Image (cartoon, helix red, strand yellow):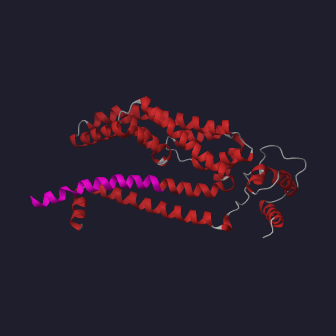
Amino acid sequence: MNDLLLAWVVDYGGALLFAVTYLSCLAIPVPSSLLMLAGGGFIASGDLTLISTGGAAYLGAVLGDQSGFQLGRRTGPMIEAKLAKAPKRAALHKKATDLTDRHGGTGVFLSRWLFSPLGPYVNFGAAAAGLNWLRFTIWAALGEAVWVTLYVGLGYGFADRITDLADILGNASGFLAAGVISIGLGYGLLKAAKPAKSDKSQ
Amino acid sequence: MLSGLKHLWRNHRLLLVAFGFAATLTIFFGVRMLLFSLYWNDPNHQNQPLKGWMTPRYVAFSYGLERDELRQILGLNPAPVSREKLQDILENQNVTLDELQIRLDAFVARRAPQ
């Protein structure tokens, strides 16, 4: 499957990268990292050009983010209406909204490239939690610039070993994404564990 | 520690299970990342094997060959059309990727004796 997609990078260049980065921003499992690395590799060999390849990948990613955001924005009020009926969940929703308000920009930026497997869900969640569109757009566009530059750049620099590199990077981003979620959940557990002592003393 | 865990299991089961799942995934990806990094560093694996999706230019670039040298190995005459893939070129020539790989490795070995 990957070999076929890699052959398509040669045949369709920017058009394929545009489609792939767009879809990956909507949580559709396409090997966008590998194909961006390949794009970089073919720029290095002179088969593709930087502007058409990198530009198309970037445009796809930015538009994909916007689509995800719009989807979240439409669903947000529905979630809110449902949660309003359950006070405990409404409190959780309030927490999520506050967190988004305080750290939403940074979260969006980092989930574009450092924790990229989380990106699509952050788009959706940030919109549903009411993140301002302009703030989202600026941070997302900056983050996607880092993502595309990083992968196309690494593909360019290590053109002779893109499939091996994709194996390392794919697992590294899985490690980072799962790691940051573990830390978040672990923090939640620590907080939840504290009342245990007061429970006992009562 | 154990009583804390019991308390969490009773009152925050979902959170605890989610944490366990996420931590397992972290370890899983961490180990794979390490293994692939070791593979990357192994000198035996530092030449990417030929694949059908590669273009002659890409092969020349990644094996450090001049385009004319590669053209010679491929037995191409005249010059390949830009962005033609190995799979298309080889189909026309009745040569398999493996045969080409042997030719290429032999050429590279001849050129840079260790």
Q: Residue furthest right?
A: B77
Q: Nearer the viewer, residue A156 or A34?
A: A156
Q: How many marks?
A: 0
For residue A172, side relative to residue A77 (left or right): right
Q: Residue furthest bottom?
A: B114
Residue A18 x %, y %: 61, 38
What residue lies at 34% left-to-right and 36% top-to-bottom? A101
Is A79 magenta? The answer is: no
For residue A172, side relative to residue B44 (left or right): left
Q: Quadrant of residue B81?
A: top right
What residue lies at 14% left-to-right and 58% top-to-bottom? A199
Q: Is residue B14 visible?
A: no
Q: Residue furthest top?
A: A134
Q: Nearer the viewer, residue B12 or B59?
A: B59
Residue A179 x %, y %: 42, 55
Residue A163 x %, y %: 64, 56
What residue lies at 66% left-to-right and 46% top-to-bottom? A40
Q: Quadrant of residue B47?
A: bottom right
Main SS class of the magenta portion in the image = helix
Q: Residue furthest left?
A: A202
Tell me the magenta residue range: A175-202
Residue B24 x %, y %: 41, 62
* Vertical side of A45 occupied by B108: above or below: below
Check the picture and name the quadrant holding the C terminus of chain B.
bottom right
For residue A51, side relative to residue A30 (left or right): right
Q: Is residue A172 visible?
A: yes
Is A200 magenta? The answer is: yes
Check the picture and name the quadrant holding the N terminus of chain B.
bottom left
For residue B106, side relative to residue A129 (left or right): right
